[in-house]
């Protein structure tokens, strides 16, 4: 089941879970309440491995979580605040028959204050103050209480339930801007669609091809056949164990060639264990190990992608796992835990034509661009590319010269010269290049 961590004040979580009952067939909701919004940081770090996605009760915990783990598709927030603003404003107006002339409002930085004024609330003077999401709530309380004591406001709208409680204790008319059923339902509908998509993706067929290079003749002469067979048995035993962890079926496809049938979800969840197993096999066998994984909505498509993946792994000579999915996206899992993702195809005819003129594949171009973006290089040399892509220096020079000829990269300078050799040319992807 798709697990969603629900983060927010306890009252907000209760409202969310009440609306969420109709979505419980596809989603398991894990309530994770806080007393103060700043606790969101600790909650996210502590439970990030327990859930598939996050649902935050508003823009404040959402912004805090984004600051902890960055932009992420797993983050969802009930961010529509306009209806909640009107609801809390009406609640405030009902507290005083003669109405309000001046009210103070606290809002997170993420909300544009001009949008509040465009709502045209029936209050002459709005004192709007914005705060960072992880602000100390006592600072917000002091802001409102000072305005009240100076007689500059006669009511308060706040985003923080603790601030509301403290102001109520002072006898100040106050209302908490909270989420509405409509906002909750809209967000849950979006989350439910994602859960369904994730379920279908996880149940896709996954086929793993593992190929152990045959020992050379000299090694066969030096070692006893018994030793070689013993090493093969150890490899098969290791693959049997990983097959069990993947809930998969293990088959021997030939001498040194193996297949594991599993599901995409199981392979994705255990990719680190698979990677460790491949590395141990390499250490024991002392020969290159190629590993390719293919995903697809049928066995035929998964096998086709797995064969493409293992071929890329074999030609790389770097003992890495290569994954190819149904959309042609390639992921390389290297021994140093580095992951590189790129497209093996392109739907841009102009790019394909330019690359074909200089005999460079779309896959190689996308892979090169992915490496440069991942390393956050503004400039790079042919030596950088040779080392990262595991190719000869001469070949990397040919590729960069070809890309410069097509205008996809530009020459921007040279490295500093040294006594050991000539300076290297510095390249950068063209600033006006739209192919990405």
Image (spheres, grey):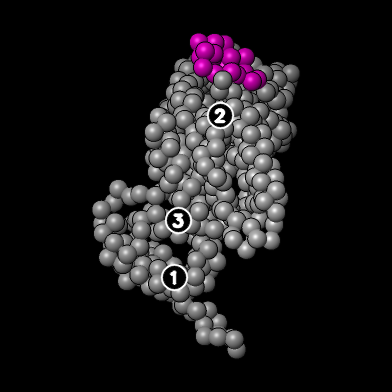
* 15 part of magenta stretch: yes
In terms of sequence position, does the residue under pointer 3 or pointer 1 come before the other? 3
Residue 301 on image: x %, y %: 39, 35
Q: For the residues marked 2 and 1, what is the alpha-carbon distance in whole angstroms?
A: 40 Å
Residue drawn at x 65%, y 60% is: 221
Residue 264 on image: x %, y %: 51, 32
Residue drawn at x 41%, y 48% is: 343
Start and end of the magenta stretch? 13-31
SS for dot 3: helix
Q: Is residue 6 positioned above or below 15 on the image?
A: below
Residue drawn at x 41%, y 58% is: 364
Residue 109 on image: x %, y %: 56, 39
Judging depth in this view, the residue of 7 and 120 nearest the camera is 7
Give the quarter of the figure containing the N terminus. top right
Q: For the residues marked 3 and 2, what is the alpha-carbon distance in whole angstroms?
A: 32 Å
Which residue, given by chain and number where applicable, does mark 1 sit on? 395
Judging depth in this view, the residue of 351 and 61 nearest the camera is 351
Q: Is residue 116 positioned above or below 410 on the image?
A: above
Determine whether, in the image, residue 222 is placed left or right of residue 371. right
Q: For the residues marked 3 and 1, what is the alpha-carbon distance in whole angstroms?
A: 15 Å
Marker disc for residue 249: 2
Look at discs 3 and 2 and give the one toward the viewer: 2
Marker disc for residue 367: 3
């Amino acid at each position: 089941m798709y697990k969603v961590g629900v983060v927010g004040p306890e009252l907000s979580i209760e409202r969310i879970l009440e609306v969420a009952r109709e979505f419980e067939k596809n989603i398991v909701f894990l309530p994770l309440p806080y007393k103060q919004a700043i606790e969101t940081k600790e909650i996210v770090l502590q439970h990030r491995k327990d859930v598939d996605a996050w649902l935050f009760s508003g823009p404040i915990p959402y912004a805090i979580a984004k600051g902890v783990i960055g932009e992420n598709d797993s983050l969802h927030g009930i961010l529509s605040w306009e209806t909640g603003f009107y609801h809390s404003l009406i609640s405030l107006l009902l507290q005083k028959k003669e109405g309000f002339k001046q009210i103070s409002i606290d809002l997170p930085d993420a909300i544009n204050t001009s949008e509040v004024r465009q709502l045209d609330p029936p209050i002459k003077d709005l004192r709007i103050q914005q705060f960072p999401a992880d602000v100390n709530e006592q600072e917000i309380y002091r802001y409102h209480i000072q305005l009240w004591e100076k007689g500059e406001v006669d009511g308060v709208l706040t985003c923080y339930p603790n601030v509301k409680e403290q102001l109520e204790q002072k006898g100040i008319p106050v209302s908490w801007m909270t989420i509405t059923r409509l906002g909750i339902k809209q967000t849950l509908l979006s989350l439910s669609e994602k859960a369904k998509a994730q379920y279908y993706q996880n149940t896709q067929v996954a086929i793993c091809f593992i190929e152990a290079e045959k020992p050379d003749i000299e090694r066969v002469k030096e070692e006893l056949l018994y030793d070689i067979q013993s090493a093969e048995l150890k490899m098969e035993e290791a693959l049997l164990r990983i097959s069990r962890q993947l809930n998969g079926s293990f088959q021997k496809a030939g001498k040194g060639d193996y297949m594991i049938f599993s599901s995409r979800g199981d392979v994705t969840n255990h990719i680190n264990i698979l990677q460790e197993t491949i590395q141990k096999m390499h250490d024991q066998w002392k020969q290159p190990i190629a590993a390719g994984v293919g995903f697809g909505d049928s066995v035929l498509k998964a096998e086709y992608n797995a064969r493409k993946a293992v071929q890329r792994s074999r030609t790389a000579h770097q003992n890495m796992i290569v994954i190819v999915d149904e959309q042609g996206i390639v992921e390389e899992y290297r021994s140093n835990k580095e992951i590189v993702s790129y497209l093996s195809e392109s739907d841009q005819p102009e790019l394909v034509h330019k690359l074909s003129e200089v005999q460079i594949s779309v896959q190689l171009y996308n892979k090169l661009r992915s490496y440069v973006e991942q390393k956050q290089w503004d400039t790079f040399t042919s030596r950088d590319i040779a080392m990262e892509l595991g190719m000869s220096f001469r070949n990397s020079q040919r590729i960069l010269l070809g890309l410069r000829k097509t205008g996809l990269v530009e020459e921007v300078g040279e490295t500093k010269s040294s006594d050991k050799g000539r300076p290297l040319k510095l390249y950068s992807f063209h600033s006006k290049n739209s192919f990405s």
